Image: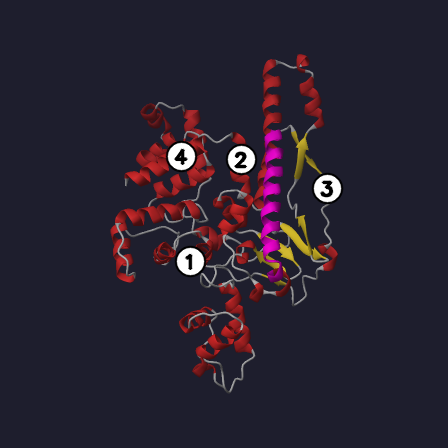
């Protein structure tokens, strides 16, 4: 257990030492256009030194895409929480044997995305279903890995306190050690706003506790519920970029469906003449301008990182965008993070619940990721499922293809997979066996 505790302490110390800009960048990198627009709107209300820039962001797609065209697709099948977590698991850089454990845990989560069983109960479940034997420490390490890697934050926790502490780490709050202590020992006092007793017990001010209480209100005690509350399909502006090809060259156009801002000319001029201002007013305006400058700079950095990541993903998967699922290449989050020299969690935040618009429709960025079928194959599991579906659609209904026949047809395409894998993919596609498909 000490190994795990040390990892958490080191991680917390590292996050506590992050600069204000790094903390803001981590926050902004997770936001889609709608949430970024809400944050900017709040800043416009709160900071008099920021003003909105009125710009036109009309795209070539505004005239070229017919949203009523039956060939234009928008994802509209709402994912269950378990589906969403399994999608993430497939792209996670984790040992195959550990993924099997995570899969068992995912299917035992409650509706809020939290773990009801003790580690002993999970261990029994794992050891009954898997040939290799594990220990409680190994199970705990895997759960901690899940808490750090999966979206939404707070998933895979076992109590309200643990759920809130995980989310606080993601938000990189100030004074994280003290706040963790309060959450662990006195969450009820905090929830009841008993600030007098807390202030005495922890030697903090009521102002500190008021701020902490507001921070806690922004967290979600039931993170799994987010999925059912999200819109089932993206709206007409809920995508990060338009992506299209001109003479086989990828063109990336960001969808700035949020307010653009700048520092107010009036306040910039005002602060240059400090002699006409009182010390308090000068300090107030200076702080607000500094905050505005940081926000504008960080939004620009967030957008630059989005462009780099999305362009790279789309370049790798250009045939998938142009031709469809059977051309999807194997791709993991770690492939993109290593190419961009960023942490895998950054790529995960960029691609979670984010979409692009292309000529085929609106596509979830998570759909661009898929594992190889095996270590010797360059074909993705999604691509193979698409090929199987295509074969079944075009088969002779009086003499439908058996799983072995499908395996042989794939082998001709240099795709060598086991018959049982064919059966698994067929079940995923909800295609009955050949005997039940016979006309």
- Inter-mark Cα distance, 1 to 3: 41 Å
Indicate left or right for 383 with 106 as reference.
right
Q: Residue at x 66, y 36 (%)?
A: 261
Mark linked to residue 82: 1
Which image quarter: residue 6?
top left
Q: Residue at x 43, y 55 (%)?
A: 89
| Disc 3 crowd, CA 10 A, few/some/many (<14, 14-19, 20+) | few
- Inter-mark Cα distance, 2 to 1: 30 Å
- Inter-mark Cα distance, 2 to 3: 25 Å
**Residue 298 falls within the magenta-colored stretch:** yes
Give the extent of the magenta segment.
292-320
Which is more N-terminal, label 1 or label 2?
2
The residue tagged 2 is: 24
- Inter-mark Cα distance, 3 to 4: 41 Å
Which is more N-terminal, label 3 or label 1?
3
Please tell me whether residue 307 is drawn above or below residue 317 in the rendered image.
above
Mark linked to residue 12: 4
Q: How far across and down, in percent of the image, does residue 46 sit?
A: 59, 31
């Amino acid at each position: 257990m000490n190994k795990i505790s040390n990892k958490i302490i080191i991680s917390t110390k590292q996050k506590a030492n992050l600069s204000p800009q790094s903390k803001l960048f981590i926050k902004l990198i997770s936001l889609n256009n709608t949430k970024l627009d809400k944050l900017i709107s709040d800043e416009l209300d709160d900071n008099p030194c920021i003003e909105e820039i009125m710009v036109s962001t009309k795209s070539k797609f505004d005239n070229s895409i017919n949203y009523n065209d039956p060939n234009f697709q928008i994802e509209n099948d709402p994912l269950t929480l378990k589906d969403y977590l399994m999608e993430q698991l497939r792209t996670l850089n984790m040992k195959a044997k550990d993924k099997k454990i995570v899969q068992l845990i995912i299917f035992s989560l409650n509706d809020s995305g939290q773990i009801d069983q003790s580690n002993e109960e999970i261990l029994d479940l794992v050891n009954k279903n898997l040939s290799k034997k594990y220990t409680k420490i190994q199970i705990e390490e895997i759960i901690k890995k899940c808490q750090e890697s999966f979206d939404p934050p707070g998933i895979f926790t076992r109590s309200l306190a643990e759920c809130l502490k995980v989310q606080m780490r993601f938000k990189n709050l100030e004074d994280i050690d003290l706040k963790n202590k309060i959450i662990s020992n006195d969450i009820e006092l905090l929830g009841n706003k008993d600030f007098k007793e807390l202030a005495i017990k922890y030697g903090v001010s009521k102002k500190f506790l008021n701020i902490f209480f507001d921070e806690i209100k922004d967290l979600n005690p039931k993170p799994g519920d987010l999925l059912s509350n999200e819109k089932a399909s993206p709206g007409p502006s809920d995508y990060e970029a338009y992506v299209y090809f001109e003479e086989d060259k990828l063109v990336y156009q960001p969808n700035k469906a949020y307010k653009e801002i700048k520092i107010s000319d009036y306040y910039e001029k005002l602060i240059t003449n400090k002699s006409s201002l009182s010390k308090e007013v000068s300090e107030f305006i200076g702080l607000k301008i500094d905050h505005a400058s940081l926000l504008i700079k960080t939004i620009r950095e967030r957008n630059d990182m989005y462009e780099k990541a999305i362009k790279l993903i789309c370049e790798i998967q250009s045939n998938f965008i142009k031709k469809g699922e059977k051309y999807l290449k194997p791709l993991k989050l770690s492939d993109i993070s290593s190419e961009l020299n960023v942490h895998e969690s950054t790529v995960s935040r960029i691609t979670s619940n984010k979409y692009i618009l292309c000529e085929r429709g609106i596509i979830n960025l998570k759909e661009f990721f898929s594992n190889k079928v095996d270590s010797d194959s360059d074909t993705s599991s999604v691509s193979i499922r698409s090929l199987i579906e295509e074969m079944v659609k075009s088969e002779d209904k009086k003499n439908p293809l058996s799983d072995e026949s499908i395996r042989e047809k794939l082998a001709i395409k240099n795709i060598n997979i086991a018959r049982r894998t064919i059966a698994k993919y067929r079940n995923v596609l909800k295609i009955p066996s050949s005997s039940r498909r016979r006309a």
